[in-house]
Image: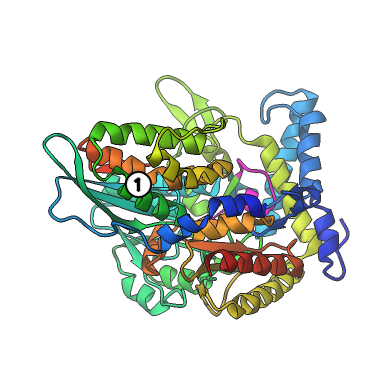
């Protein structure tokens, strides 16, 4: 059991949750969305500036949540900065597979390699929504929606 | 069943098959009875027998099984009636849950009594199930919902309540015990004050029923609701106690079979008493299981249960207070064995996941009491809720698993 827990709460996760990167609000910003998990009441707000050629120039987030959701949001903000909207969508898809699919995950690039620290979530199905909340909010922001709730 | 002379928690645990199960190979420490309680053999056997020996629909047909099934179902109603000291079995309505019981009163009494400008008084301690049904009927009728505030200890503020009562108040609906923080509301005083104001009162007793004996003649509640699964019975069964004087006036909540007197396409006349509010085939076996659960707790006795739980509450509170990073939320003087807490720098979900790996089941989240969470300015808490089958080993396991949390986040 301790192995699963240590896999879930790796140093990197604890570090990002205690000292989240890009934490705060971006004002003004071109896109924003509010992620909400009605089951636990956690929130993640994502703010970003998208250039005319759909590149995420800057991204900030804030909110209240568990170590997993805060760390995931923090890592996400670092990784998607400078990516295009399309690249961000693909990253989310791959990340979603990483935390939900059973098969061994082969990271395709450096970004996915960094996200591997969240692979431990797979052993805790109740916690998948914590890890994906910020990503759902990012998708909503990129798609021009303002609110998203995990179900 | 014979009364257990002195409280023997190990003997009680032996009545609950789940406690021989292991979680991740470890002893099960079940501290989530506030969400739903485990079931004793007596209930499981009653349910099994009802399906295997006497099952048929009730109130229909003249055959042997239908008669037996009806007797058992109505016997369960009598058990509930006696247990609550209701005036008659006609005042005991079986529903599918406490939530449905509240919705029934909100819709039926609400349509009867509420007009634009009228007020419904709730409290900050309410579960969503005693908030949302009232908001729905308020929206339909133009009435307004008011909430009695609490203080930082989670005490119901009687003075503020009395100030809210007015000629506009058409119903008061408050919980008997807060599911999130354990506060015991002085409901007898609440009811008395409302009655002096000419206002009927609904009490949500879902959390109270497993911990204390309630007496409808003594409390004088107009409506008292509870759910079966929290008092060691099956899910899918709830109870609404309602004074006959209200049931006679209230319109039916749902239409269907079993709630009628005579049906024609021109006009239907309705059954009276509880039948008027039990449309369709009822939760027959669940009601029988609830009856068995009530017999079981009475065989142990509520004085013994309450004393045992209060000593567990004191022990758990003391042990938790020794952990520096723990803050207990809700410190009412009169409190049931429910402890909400947070740990400095650790989100409740992370606490829940880590203690679970030690076989410790607690609830983490907003406990369907978001206005209360907002009051304490927390999105969620961790909650350990105790029942008669918990012992000091459970408290020790919780404390030890919380130390593991501290190690991770220290």
Residue B337: % across, % down: 63, 68
Image vertical order of residue B302 relative to residue B234, above or below = below
Q: Residue at x 46, y 63 (%)?
A: B174
Q: Is residue B190 left or right of residue A75?
A: right
Residue B255: % across, % down: 47, 31
Q: Is residue A101 left or right of residue A141?
A: right
> For the residue carrying disc 1, how many other residues have a C-alpha within 10 Å: few (<14), some (14-19), or many (20+)?
many
Image vertical order of residue B201 relative to residue B230, above or below = below
Q: Residue at x 82, y 69 (%)?
A: B7
Residue B183: % across, % down: 53, 71
Q: Which of the image's four quarters has the N terminus of chain B?
A: bottom right
Q: Looking at the rendering, which quadrant does residue B117 occupy? A: bottom left
Q: Dot 1: what SS?
A: helix
Q: Looking at the rendering, which quadrant does residue A135 occupy? A: top left
**Residue farthest to the top, as pictured:** B265
Q: Is residue B34 left or right of residue B312?
A: left
Q: Residue at x 69, y 68 (%)?
A: B395
| Residue B224 inside the magenta-drawn segment | yes
Q: Which residue in the structure is indicated by mark 1? A: A76
Which stretch appears magenta?
B223-237
Q: Chain letter of disc 1?
A: A
- Asked whether residue B389 appears in the rendered view, the answer is yes
Front position in the image: B169 or B178: B178
- Asked whether residue B337 appears in the rendered view, the answer is no
Residue B57: % across, % down: 68, 27
Front position in the image: B124 or B291: B124
């Amino acid at each position: 059991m301790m192995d699963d827990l240590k896999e879930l709460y790796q140093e990197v996760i604890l570090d990002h949750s205690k000292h989240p990167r890009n934490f705060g609000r971006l004002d003004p910003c071109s896109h924003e969305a509010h992620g909400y998990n009605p089951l636990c009441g956690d929130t993640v707000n994502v703010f970003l500036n998208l250039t005319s050629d759909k590149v995420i120039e800057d991204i900030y987030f804030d909110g209240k949540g568990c170590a997993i959701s805060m760390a995931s949001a923090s890592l996400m903000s670092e990784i998607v900065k400078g990516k295009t909207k399309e690249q961000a969508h693909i990253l989310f898809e791959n990340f979603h597979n990483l935390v939900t699919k059973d098969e061994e995950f082969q990271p395709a690039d450096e970004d996915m390699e960094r996200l591997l620290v969240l692979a431990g979530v797979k052993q805790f199905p109740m916690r998948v929504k914590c890890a994906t909340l910020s990503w759902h909010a990012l998708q909503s922001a990129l798609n021009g929606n303002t609110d998203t709730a995990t179900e | 069943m014979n009364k257990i002379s002195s409280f023997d928690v190990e003997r009680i645990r032996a009545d609950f098959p789940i406690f021989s199960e292991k979680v991740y190979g470890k002893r099960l420490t079940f501290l989530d009875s506030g969400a739903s309680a485990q079931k004793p053999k007596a209930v499981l056997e009653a349910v099994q027998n009802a399906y295997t020996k006497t099952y048929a629909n009730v109130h229909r047909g003249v055959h042997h099984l239908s008669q037996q099934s009806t007797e058992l179902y109505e016997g369960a109603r009598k058990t509930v009636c006696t247990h609550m000291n209701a005036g008659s079995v006609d005042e005991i309505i079986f529903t599918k849950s406490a939530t449905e019981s509240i919705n029934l009163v909100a819709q039926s009494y609400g349509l009867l009594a509420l007009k634009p400008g009228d007020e419904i008084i709730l409290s900050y301690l309410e579960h969503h199930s005693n908030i949302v049904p009232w908001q729905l009927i308020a929206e339909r009728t133009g009435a307004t919902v008011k909430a009695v505030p609490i203080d930082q200890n989670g005490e119901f503020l009687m003075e503020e309540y009395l100030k809210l009562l007015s000629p506009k108040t058409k119903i008061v609906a408050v919980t008997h015990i807060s599911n999130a923080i354990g506060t015991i509301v002085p409901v007898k005083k609440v009811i008395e004050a409302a009655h002096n104001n000419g206002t009927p009162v609904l009490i949500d007793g879902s959390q109270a029923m497993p911990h204390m004996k309630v007496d409808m003649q003594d409390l004088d509640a107009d409506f008292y609701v509870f759910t079966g699964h929290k008092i060691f019975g099956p899910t899918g069964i709830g109870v609404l106690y309602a004074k006959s004087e209200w049931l006679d006036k209230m319109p039916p909540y749902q239409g269907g079979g079993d709630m009628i007197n005579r049906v024609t396409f021109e006009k239907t006349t309705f059954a009276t008493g509880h039948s008027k509010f039990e449309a369709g085939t009822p939760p027959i076996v669940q009601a029988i299981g609830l009856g068995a659960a009530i017999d079981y707790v009475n065989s142990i006795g509520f004085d013994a249960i309450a004393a045992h739980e209060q000593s567990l509450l004191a022990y758990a509170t003391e042990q938790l207070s020794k952990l520096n990073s723990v803050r207990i939320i809700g410190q009412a003087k009169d409190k049931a064995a429910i402890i909400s807490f947070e740990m400095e720098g650790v989100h409740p979900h992370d606490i829940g996941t880590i203690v679970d790996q030690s076989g410790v089941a607690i609830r983490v989240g907003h406990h369907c009491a978001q206005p209360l969470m907002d009051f304490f300015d927390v999105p969620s808490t961790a909650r350990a809720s105790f029942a008669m089958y918990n012992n000091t080993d459970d408290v020790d396991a919780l404390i030890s698993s919380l130390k593991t949390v501290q190690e991770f986040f220290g």
